[in-house]
Image: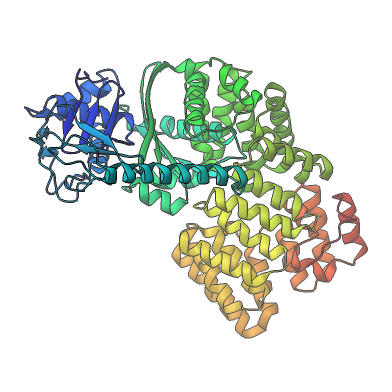
Amino acid sequence: MAHMPHETIRFEVFELDPGSFELRRAGRLVKLERIPLQLLFLLAENRDRLVTREEILLTIWGKDVFVDADNSINTAVRKARQALKDDPENPRFLRTIPGKGYRFTAPVSTEALATFPLLDGSREITPPANTKLPPHSGVRKDTPSAVPQTSPTSGVLTPEVRRAIFSAVALIALLAVGLLLRSHFTKPPKTIPKKAMLVVLPFLNLSADPHEDYFADGMTEEMITQLGSLDPQHLGVIARTSSMQYKGAKKGAAQVARELGVDYLLEGSVRRSNQRIRVAAQLIQASDQTHLWAADFDRDLSDVLKFQSDLALAISNKIELTLSPSARTRLAEAPSLNAAAYEAYLQGLHDWDLRTKPAVERAISEFQHALALDPNYAPAHGALARAYSLAPVVGAMPPMESMPKAREAAQRAISLDPSLAAGHSTLGFVLAHYDFDWPAAEREYLRALDLNPNDAYAHLFYSNSYLSPLGRHAEAISEMQKAVAIDPFSAPVQSFLGRTYIWARQYDKAQAQFRKCAEMFPGFAIDHERLAQLLAFLGRFEDAIDEDTKARLLAGEEEHSALQKEGALRHALATRGSQGYWKQLLEFTQLPVNPPEAYNSPFGTAILYSQLGEKSKALDSLEKAFDQRSLSMTELTIEPSFDPIRPDPRFQTLLRRVGLEKTIVKY
């Protein structure tokens, strides 16, 4: 901490009091966080000279703490000026010396300020004689006292003065009694505290190697998970996908807060050197950009969980969260980690977030490597389970191979750490999509959401893997809306809300949601393919062809190939109508290149055959999809294209095999 002066420093109507470490204006406390206040003390104490930026950094942050120097100093100066209402273009107190540092330029006095009470309970302050007051400073120099004054030559109170004083005292007494009675008989209305929202902004990578971004990104994701499970009833945490939208963005705290609708922002930086990590973090209140708290950590990599727990506990104290005994125990008992295992785990998270076939395959390998080094690392088991469970989506592994592995990893994660929400949600996914054990799936999803309601994907999977298949559409939509609120800048979440509307037969809302997602994420190919399928189902084939072509181009298909297929679809539609359109799509399923979520799967071809009126072939394809344990089999009850074949006995047999024969779907 900066060297503190021994005497109170007074300038204009302000006081810097080293005894209480406070800034006061006209006797009233001015709220200012620690670092800007330290900066003010440093500059005021050294008011006779220039204080360089290097000196500020060394004095306030210290030589062994790594921070973004320019940003940290600029932020502290800006906050100090805001507290002083000092115009940087025409400063009265803090003058910038470009490229060098800052000077404190206000006249300073150490005289005691004369004060006397006013009738409203405040203090009127008479500044020292050598202090100049700015216009509208708030200090009343010439305001006459509310109490009549004695004659300057008398020294004796006249009867009129005595009567005035008695009347004033009596009036004050009556007011005090009235206020006491009012407070006694009037109960304030009960207020329901608003759930606070927080975003963990991407931690800056200050390491020498820019390829170590994965480490800073992983730390960001880990802090999101840690904070999300602290006090879910009172604190919501924006999901990683939306948080990472701000990586490298030149946006201020106020703008980020407006865009995400958050109350607090946590920002920080990470520097790793061999087996040591140095982290600087600060908590910002969005309403006024006040820095509520800041700290620096220097730890061994093996103690990273302890650092994360300390950080989470400090934040919970600062924003007054109510932690359960189990949460406090978890934070207090953070174990040490195998450093190499943790690095492999973070690298796996980085690859997993890319959501491509090669990246998911690399993620699985990294998680397996982490577990070979530390077999009891529960989060790595949970991450491996999720990677296995969604490997079929990107074509990295067939469900018959991946889902048993996902179940085993999820169960192992839960046995090691029953409070790991990701383990429960992934197990719920396996129970629904592979085992068709709906009661068990519901238990796991509800347990996951109870442990961490801030997990956007837990809400998404509970919605599309359980509530929608069972026909509980209002609840499914509500869960998806919760996922959107937690992760508003996630293209998959925004687009999947559109699918949820389709299953609820709310086609106008589905179309509007797909178009909203396309506006937010114009390069998201899956969204255009989903919109194409909806438009075709509604008979708007020309528009569907436009969206299908966009999906192909965005998915990386060669322009010549995509335009050739567009021409084939338009020709088939023009010559053979809707039947020609569906048959042409069926031919495309035999080709190696198609956009994501096209119809090139047994479940997809079943949809095409149903649209063509070929019921037997549609049912053949569905039975093949069941034998392959296609993840889409949970959509049997809700896929609109299957309405024509739903009464068929073979379809009803399939419903029984997936445990949905008693499901009553209402629209």
Note whether 186 is above or below 304 in the view shown: below
Which color scheme did the rendering employ for the protein?
Answer: rainbow
Q: In which quarter of the image is the C terminus?
A: bottom right
- Image coords of residue 74 (percent x, y): 23, 38
The residue located at (15%, 28%) in the rendering is 44
Position of 547 compared to 14: left or right? right
Q: How many labels does the image show?
A: 0
The residue located at (62%, 73%) in the rendering is 535
Residue 191 visible to an observer of this rendering: yes
- Farthest residue to the right: give it: 649
Position of 429 compared to 189: left or right? right
The one of 507 and 274 positioned closer to us in this rendering: 507
- Farthest residue to the front: give it: 159
Q: Quadrant of residue 377?
A: top right
Position of 146 compared to 586: left or right? left
Position of 602 compared to 396: left or right? right
Q: Quadrant of residue 611?
A: bottom right
Residue 68 visible to an observer of this rendering: no
- Image coords of residue 269 (percent x, y): 36, 31
Q: In which quarter of the image is the N terminus?
A: top left
- Image coords of residue 540 (percent x, y): 62, 78
- Farthest residue to the bottom: give it: 575
The one of 532 and 311 positioned closer to us in this rendering: 311
The residue located at (70%, 47%) in the rendering is 462
- Image coords of residue 383 (percent x, y): 60, 32
